[in-house]
Image: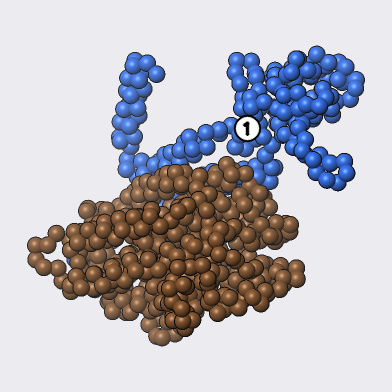
Chain colours: A brown, B blue
Amino acid sequence: MAQLTGLFLIATLLFVHLSTKARPLQRARPLDVDEVPFPAAGQASTVFSLTALFGAYYGIFLVLGVYAVIGLSIGSVLALIAIRRSVLHAAEERYEHYLFNRLNRLPDFLPFLAPLAATQLLFGVSELLVLRRMLAAGFGVAEIHATLMAICIAAIGYLYCLIGGYNAVFRTDIVQLVFILVMCTALLVHFIASGGQIDPTAAAVRLHGVHPGHWYADVIRIPVLQHLFDFLVGLPMGMTFLLASPDTWKRVFIVTKRDRRPRSLIVLIAAGAFPFVLITPMVLLAKPLSPGTINPMFILEAIAANDALMGAILLGLISSFLSAFNSAFISSLHLAVLQVRKAKKRKNELAVVRFLAGGLFVALALFFLFLFPMSNPYALGNVLLGPYAVAGATVLALRGGNRVVRPLFLFGLWTVTMTTWAVYLIVRVNDWGIASTHEANTIPPGIALFVVTLVVLTLAGRKELPRGSV
Amino acid sequence: MDPFSAIETGEKTYKFFKVLRALPVDLLSRLFAYVIAPVIVGVLSWFAFGRPGTLFAPEYALTVTELASYTETGIPQPHSAVAMLVEPSRYEYAVPMEMGKSRRLVTSLTPDEWRRNSDKLAWAGSDLALKLPLLGVSRPIMVLADGKVGKELLVAGGKIPVDRLQIVARRSVNMVTWAFVSAIFGIGLGVASDDAPVRQNSRRQNRRKEDEDEIVDRHAE
């Protein structure tokens, strides 16, 4: 299994190297690359992340049931449609021009870009934490080795971005998607072959969306209203994850620019909904979860006997990690590059990209090494609900750059919302170290943050900034 | 560190940064991205783990595992014993033990081999004394002893916490080794790949200048 992992990583690096030979990064605008293959496939691959699909979304399906997941998938599709509308509305031919010109309407990018880039970077850290825990719990890797291995795999992801930029990220996404599909198929075949049967009670609970033990289940007594609430909770969550991911903007831009017909919309919808369809059998096959403490790695620990299956799963998980990590990393890098460009335009931006990428990688490793002793790897993902809610609401309220607000106002809004979120988490969450079904209780307050930000920014947003504003 | 050494180190660091600053930006950026940043991450990990010597292979020629249970009737019972894997090396160890039910030692040495090394592997009071290398033995050996091992082992000039001598799964070591090798391979490949556009650009510098100016102008608009 170790050799298999090594060969996979080295083969992927060689793949990046060869594709870079044919399409080296340009010195002037290294990240201005729209000529990439199958961006929609990569879209599905980005959602297949350890924190989102195999963490939050899977957990929501298990704990809150099908109505919340329907909300999530419809939210994802709505986000893709909203971004597509913004792309169609703009008359730009290149993604970088589209992004830069939209941002350029603001006197200063920083209050908009910095939180977004930080959210993406922390998402990458969360992926690392989950990968480390999966390696330790599912594959018998010693804790210290799992930590080092996660850093090494992250270094490989960092090198992809550095060597090949978007070209490497998009091309490897296709390969990674194949490995993820192999993993999901292998898991499904294993469950069926080993006599795994759908527990009717557990399936009924998940399909009917009954979730005792959660605060709003006791507040809302009528089942229909409870289902509606679950749906309404899932909807903005699905939206914010994609709206706050610049990687998604780029993918939607490329798909839309290549084909302006509604067919491209169908491709995007299919790509957005595909991951949810794929995890449904795994959710239905999972055993019932009683409210309270859970072992988030229970699936991995149940299949530890079969070496071939473990190999397929390990490669699938590493692919999933690399796919999400690279997208998050290159997104934050791109935002940082735009911020630097706003301050000073350079003819050779390749050196800037290298400096920023190195700096971001060090920052990411610092966060990871600071947080890795945490026993619950999903805690950071839970914390990120707040920043994603505010970032998603900001993009939506400002219509993807069609409307603007004063940078100082935006900065103040981020400060107030994040302080509120931090206070809420400190007061409400008793034990960060323990994975629990009650982590789902943080979703509705996260959505409340989304709604408040959306309303405030919709009211404050203007077509143009008043003269002299800073 | 004494003040003079600190000043000397400071001066060397200053000179190093001065040399770095004198490098062309392109080369400096490549150096930072492919060497300095990964090295910083490596050093940070080194400090975070606190015990780098045990990452890929045992740091010492001794691996210690406590044997905590036994059974004769099929029902597990608590037990207090220790198993040690001793690899060929030049070390002397004293393993402090809380005495168990017996002073019996079991090893993978043949009786002949042990007779020749009877002073090198034996009880010394309540300590188990190991003086390596053993005469005529070049393979790793296994030693089993009754009793509970102390928290630290004694070696010439110091103590080693027993925690650092625990057995590590080979799969675990293999996996991290492969990931590490792949990352190093990636850095090498990155430096090699990233060289291409620089050369290409230096050859085509004049031809590209116009294109670059045009792009900058377009953004300025």
Image coordinates for residue A146, horizontal then vertical, percent: 58, 46
In the displayed structure, does residue B172 sit left or right of residue A237? right
Vertical position of residue A72 compared to residue B50: above or below = below
> Where is residue A454, by image quadrant?
bottom left
Give residue A334's position: percent from left, percent from top.
Answer: 35, 58
Tell me the subunit letter for badge 1: B
Front residue (pair A27, A364): A364
* Residue A371 visible in the snapshot: yes
Task: Report the quarter where the C terminus of chain A lies.
Answer: bottom left
Q: Which of the 4 image quarters holds residue B120? A: top right
Q: How many marks?
A: 1
Report the residue that reaches farthest toward the bottom. A262
**Secondary structure at numbered mark 1:** helix
Percent across and percent down for residue A19 are 50, 60
Vertical arrangement, residue A91 with respect to residue B58, above or below: below
Badge 1 local density, few (<14 within 10 Å), some, or many (20+)?
few
Three-letter residue code for mark 1: Asp
Percent coordinates x, y for residue A64 in the rendering:
51, 71
Residue to which mark 1 is pinned: B163
A190 horizontally vs A220: left or right? right
Q: Name the residue nearer the viewer: B197 or A424.
A: A424
Q: Is residue A193 visible?
A: no
Q: Residue at x 89, y 25 (%)?
A: B110
